[in-house]
Image (cartoon, coloured by chain):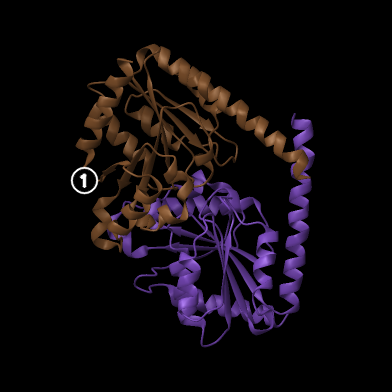
Chain colours: A purple, B brown
Amino acid sequence: MSAIRVPIVEKILNANDKMAALIRGRLDSHQVLALNLMASPGAGKTSFILETIKRIRDSYRLGVIEGDTAPVTIDSDKISAVGIPAVQINTGGGCHLEASMVGDGIEQLPLSEIDLIIVENVGNLVCPAAWDIGTHMNVLVASIPEGDDKPYKYPNIYRGLQVLIINKTDLLPYIDFDMDYFRKGVEFLNPGLITFAVSCKTGEGMDAWIEWLKEQIRIQKNR
Amino acid sequence: MSAIRVPIVEKILNANDKMAALIRGRLDSHQVLALNLMASPGAGKTSFILETIKRIRDSYRLGVIEGDTAPVTIDSDKISAVGIPAVQINTGGGCHLEASMVGDGIEQLPLSEIDLIIVENVGNLVCPAAWDIGTHMNVLVASIPEGDDKPYKYPNIYRGLQVLIINKTDLLPYIDFDMDYFRKGVEFLNPGLITFAVSCKTGEGMDAWIEWLKEQIRIQKNR
């Protein structure tokens, strides 16, 4: 039976990758930078997006695409409540976003009036790692309460990252989290990975992230 | 293309369900109760298993099956370090356990010398929900830092539960978590769901869970 299934799966992956390349080309033609924000459920992706919006909206124009498995608009409502264009994608129970879904989402955003799109993927450390969704960078929001062993247990997602955010540093005093052990695991999988330790609650560490992000938007504008 | 794919997927699901029924029959013939422990990455599944072992090992004999995406033995080492037979299943990047994997795992355990098997599924709130792995009950470990909106965002997994554990209650003073909102979401999806709020760090709430679990083991022995 594997002889039947394998070529079909490859065909789907190829169609996804072709779609992803088309999306990236479209974003590039509008000089829009797009991030694929991934995380475990509850690591703080939406809070991180809201804190990023707060600190960058005076300099650059944003759009957000929210991916969820259920037909809810909890996260996209939070984004549009602060006046940022947001699109909700419901995967219908699916465990990750695919390029075609993101392509549909992007069509709902005014690309010529946007500098940065953040796509919030489904909360999942396994499946999103395998799918190119047409963005420029994979960003993972890890969080202190998840524990320091996650790079060892979910290596595939860490291997494919361009940026790592370590969120909820305000909880470090209350949780056994060995930062050296965590960072050693990350370094093994993804040497020299750009990393920002932040707290969306206190704002700690957000300035460094914003400064770096602004530089990436400028690079995309000058390509 | 969907006309080709759908029947293949159905065939796999049926094979899985048949295998799951066989596994359950084998467990029943040995009067062994088996739990499918699911959670987000880092919700505290392994800590919860270790705290359960500590409180029940004088009364009943345990075995543990650990599922991980990566070829690591971090969790199974913790279990065998306390003298409990443990089997590690590596899914090779796969996002959930399937019945055939659990069947192989169970063959490694001395069933006639065991009363309770806890299967720790891959950390994932989406994919494991769809797979019967041959256990008797689906148990979810939710955790306070994940946030109170998870039932709304991951309804499928909440719908299929027999028991819910709310872990890390010791972090409630440091996190905005609306317990009423959380419980309302759970009640909508799974009315009357048996729920235990616990802290594996302080031990709070564990006694009620252990008392309930012992009763389930007794019921399985007297079937």
Q: Residues within 10 Å of mark 1 (few under 14, many from 20)?
A: few
Answer above or below: position of B48 versus A119: above
Residue B135's quadrant in the figure?
top left
Q: Is residue A95 above or below residue A221?
A: above
- The residue that appears at 77% across and 39% down in the rendered structure is B4
Mark 1: which secondary structure?
loop
Mark 1 residue type: Thr
Q: Residue at x 38, y 11 (%)?
A: B112
From the top left corner, tell me how far across and down residue B181 is, in percent: 32, 59
Give how far across and how far down residue A29 sits, in percent.
76, 77
Front position in the image: A201 or B141: B141
Subunit of label 1:
B
Residue at image coords 52%, 53%: A186
Left or right: A216 in relation to A207: right
Location of residue A168 with respect to B61 vertically, above or below = below
Q: Is residue B144 visible?
A: no
Quadrant holding the C terminus of chain A: bottom right
Quarter residue A134 falls in: bottom right
Residue lying furthest bottom: A58
In the rendered image, the quadrant that contains the N terminus of chain A is top right
Asked whether residue B219 appears in the rendered view, the answer is yes
Q: Nearer the viewer, residue A108 or A45?
A: A108
Residue A151 place in picture, x, y as percent: 50, 49
**Residue drawn at 60 percent across, 73 percent down:** A117
Residue where numbered disc 1 is placed: B202
Q: Position of residue B3 (x, y in %)?
A: 77, 41
Q: Count the labels in the image.
A: 1
